[in-house]
Amino acid sequence: MIEWNHWHNEPYLVGGLILLGWLFAILAGPLRARIAPGKSYPTSHAVKFYLALIVFYLAVGSPLDQIAERYLFSAHMVQHFILIYISPVLFLLGLPHWMIDPLLRVSALRIAGRIASQPVVCGVIFVLVTSAWHAPLLYEWALHDKFVHVIEHIMFFGAALFFWWSQLSPSAVFPARSYPTQMLFQLCVMIAMTPVYAYITFTTDILYPTYEYAPRLYPNFSPMDDQLLAGVIMKVGGMLIALAAIAVSFYKWYQQGDDRVVGSSK
């Protein structure tokens, strides 16, 4: 049964998160005067950045990971929801522009960044990565191979950074897109993700044998119920996030237009 005190402490997980936290501390502390003279310590950014690391660890290092791997597809979907819609948002909001823009001004990275930050490219990367990993062959492979599972989670997080870049870009070199573009982007990605949502939710077959033969945590909660719930979490959760993002962009667009009207009347 579930070991509720089972927390992952693998060196690559804990060490990787500590390394990211250390890099942020160095750049925001001792190196700040050289990188961004006159800038004060980015307290609000630091809170969000370190919270992103904590949330990431809770998603893949807490007992939730064991439940997601061995027992419930719906728990695995909750885990992916955190990796796609919560931790990456905090991560991007936690990066001050002066911390990453010096890298993006490097010639080779600037060219690559100009291509990679295009909304179409970002949307395609997100949809392909998310959809491909839900194919039964790849999904089962990740469940039975720890290294592949780590790669899967890193790819989800990375694809989510592309997904959120057009709306939450911390960079002045490749800034967030206009508010109408942000709304159109969210709508298009939501539509593009519909096939994988429908595939999981409405199929009459159990897609992943691991969950079909997993021990039942709840006697009356069948593998098909679990799969249906996972599809609902994926579809409804993703749709609500997209609609919230569209609402935020619309509100900011409205404010922008209102400020221009006020300014022109003075």
Image (cartoon, rainbow, N blue to C red):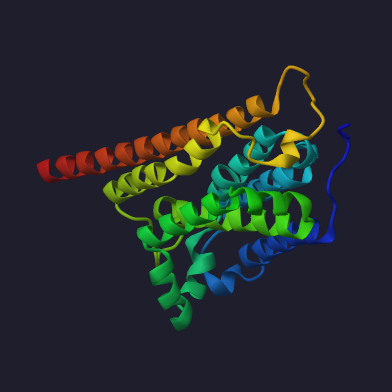
**Of 3 and 110, the residue lying toward us:** 3
Of the 4 image quadrants, the one containing the N terminus is: top right
- The image quadrant that residue 208 belongs to is top right
Farthest residue to the left: give it.
265
Q: Is residue 106 something that shows in the picture?
A: no
Residue at (45%, 56%) from the top-left corner?
Answer: 165
- The image quadrant that residue 86 belongs to is top right
Q: Is residue 31 above or below residue 263?
A: below
Residue at (44%, 82%) from the top-left corner?
Answer: 107
Farthest residue to the front: give it.
205
- The image quadrant that residue 253 belongs to is top left
**Of 196 and 240, the residue lying toward us:** 196
Farthest residue to the top: give it.
220
* Left or right: 219 as drawn, with respect to 130: right
Of the 4 image quadrants, the one containing the C terminus is: top left
Residue at (49%, 30%) from the top-left corner?
Answer: 236
- Residue 96 percent coordinates (x, y): 51, 59
Q: Is residue 120 something that shows in the picture?
A: yes
- Residue 126 percent coordinates (x, y): 48, 54
* Left or right: 257 as drawn, with respect to 116: left
- Residue 230 percent coordinates (x, y): 60, 33
- Residue 167 percent coordinates (x, y): 40, 50
